């Protein structure tokens, strides 16, 4: 079982992100180094991505816990993992976020990962251990990002991509913040709704309707964290009313909108995940972002993490 730990103190965490030369389509990366490794206990909330946690800590390191199992060390977290906590004695970790279309190519088993958390070794076999060893031996986060980008790039370039129609539908869902209608997407790609739904689920492991709901929740969570009132967030995000927003947030996060708004992870989104969240405010409910350590690789803008920490 995961031992009980304290909430993560972000003032003790150095955060690095890759330079533009190490960025790949559909892939985001961030490196975390706790300057004083300590046992932590973290509640994690679903995000529209498949996430790789590559544990570079010495000793026991990370543990991911669901209702049914504990996964120690490096792990892959699929879409919609349900009730999930992470913790243990955290030192260093490389977190890689893959959009589902990229994950289907990089991992090859994305449909089997939906709702699941598995060991990275179960997915990559011996390549998982070799990758960990190379990353641990690297002299800097910049070198680690280059190693990871090379590995992921080779996988992206050597395996069949998902159907262009499925990839297009996913991109439109993200661009519309979950408000694109499945019927409309099917018309745009020249397929029936039934065919799009079947191919989308077969290749990405989730139905288009469920994917759109997840993306819309993600947008709402960002607005809540930026300090917007729940009623305004409901209207902006396309929910029928505030009670609809409440039900959806409860469904995806297991939290109330108020609790999501102050989730500590959101305080460091603009540092850890560059590029994709122009609407985020640097203010938290307490009025400030913690004083964060930053490495030489760090860029200026950011969005939100694949996971929120309660």
Image (cartoon, grey):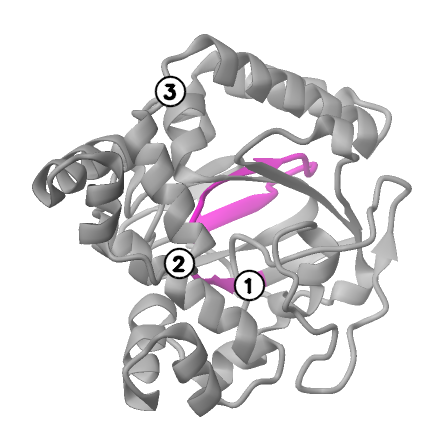
Nearer to us in this view, 37 or 10:
10
Give the residue at x 11% y 39%.
192
Figure check: 138 above or below 48: above
Q: To which residue does mark 2 refer?
A: 215
Figure check: 257 above or below 126: below
User: How far is mark 2 from mark 1, CA to CA?
Assistant: 26 Å
Q: To which residue does mark 1 refer?
A: 41
Which badge, 2 or 3, is on the more N-terminal residue? 3
Give the residue at x 61% y 43%.
61
Nearer to us in this view, 253 or 232:
232
Q: Is residue 11 left or right of residue 168?
A: right
- Badge 1: few (under 14), some or many (20 or more) residues near its Cα, within 10 Å? many
Give the residue at x 28% y 80%.
247
Give the residue at x 70% y 63%.
268
Figure check: 88 above or below 296: below
Q: Is residue 93 magenta?
A: no
Quadrant placement of the N terminus: bottom left
Task: Please identify the residue farthest to the right as the structure is shown.
Answer: 296
Q: To which residue does mark 3 refer?
A: 161
Give how far across and how far down residue 287 sits, in percent: 76, 86
- Badge 3: few (under 14), some or many (20 or more) residues near its Cα, within 10 Å? some
> What SS does tag 1 mark?
strand
**Residue 163 picture quarter:** top left
Q: Is residue 51 left or right of residue 69?
A: right
**Residue 214 picture quarter:** bottom left
Q: Which numbered mark, 2 or 1, is in the foreground of this view?
A: 2
User: How far is mark 3 from mark 1, CA to CA?
Assistant: 37 Å
Which badge, 2 or 1, is on the more N-terminal residue? 1
């Amino acid at each position: 079982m995961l031992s009980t730990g304290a909430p993560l103190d972000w003032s003790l965490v150095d955060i690095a992100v890759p330079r533009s030369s190490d960025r790949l389509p559909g892939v985001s990366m961030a490196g975390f180094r706790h300057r004083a490794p300590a046992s932590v206990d973290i509640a994690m909330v679903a995000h529209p991505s498949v996430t790789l946690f590559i544990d570079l800590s010495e000793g026991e390191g990370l543990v991911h816990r669901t209702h049914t199992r504990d996964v120690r060390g490096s792990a892959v977290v699929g879409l919609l993992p349900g009730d999930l906590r992470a913790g243990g004695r955290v030192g260093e970790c490389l977190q890689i976020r893959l959009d589902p279309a990229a994950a289907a190519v990089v991992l090859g088993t994305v449909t089997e990962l939906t709702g699941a958390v598995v060991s990275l070794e179960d997915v990559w076999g011996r390549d998982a251990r070799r990758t960990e060893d190379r990353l641990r031996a690297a002299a800097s986060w910049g070198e680690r990002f280059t190693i990871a980008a090379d590995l992921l790039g080779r996988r992206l370039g050597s395996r069949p991509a998902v159907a262009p129609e499925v990839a297009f539908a996913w991109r439109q869902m993200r661009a519309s913040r979950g408000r694109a209608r499945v019927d409309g997407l099917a018309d745009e790609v020249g397929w029936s709704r039934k065919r799009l739904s079947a191919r989308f689920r077969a290749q990405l492991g989730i139905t288009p309707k469920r994917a759109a709901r997840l993306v819309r929740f993600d947008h709402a969570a960002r607005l809540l964290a930026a300090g917007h009132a729940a009623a305004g967030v409901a209207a902006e995000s396309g929910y029928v009313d505030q009670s609809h927003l409440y039900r959806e947030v409860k469904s995806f996060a297991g939290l109330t909108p108020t609790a999501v708004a102050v989730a500590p992870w959101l305080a460091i989104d603009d540092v850890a995940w560059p590029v994709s969240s122009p609407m985020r405010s640097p203010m938290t409910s307490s009025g400030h972002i913690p004083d964060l350590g930053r490495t030489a690789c760090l860029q200026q803008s950011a969005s939100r993490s694949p996971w929120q920490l309660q």
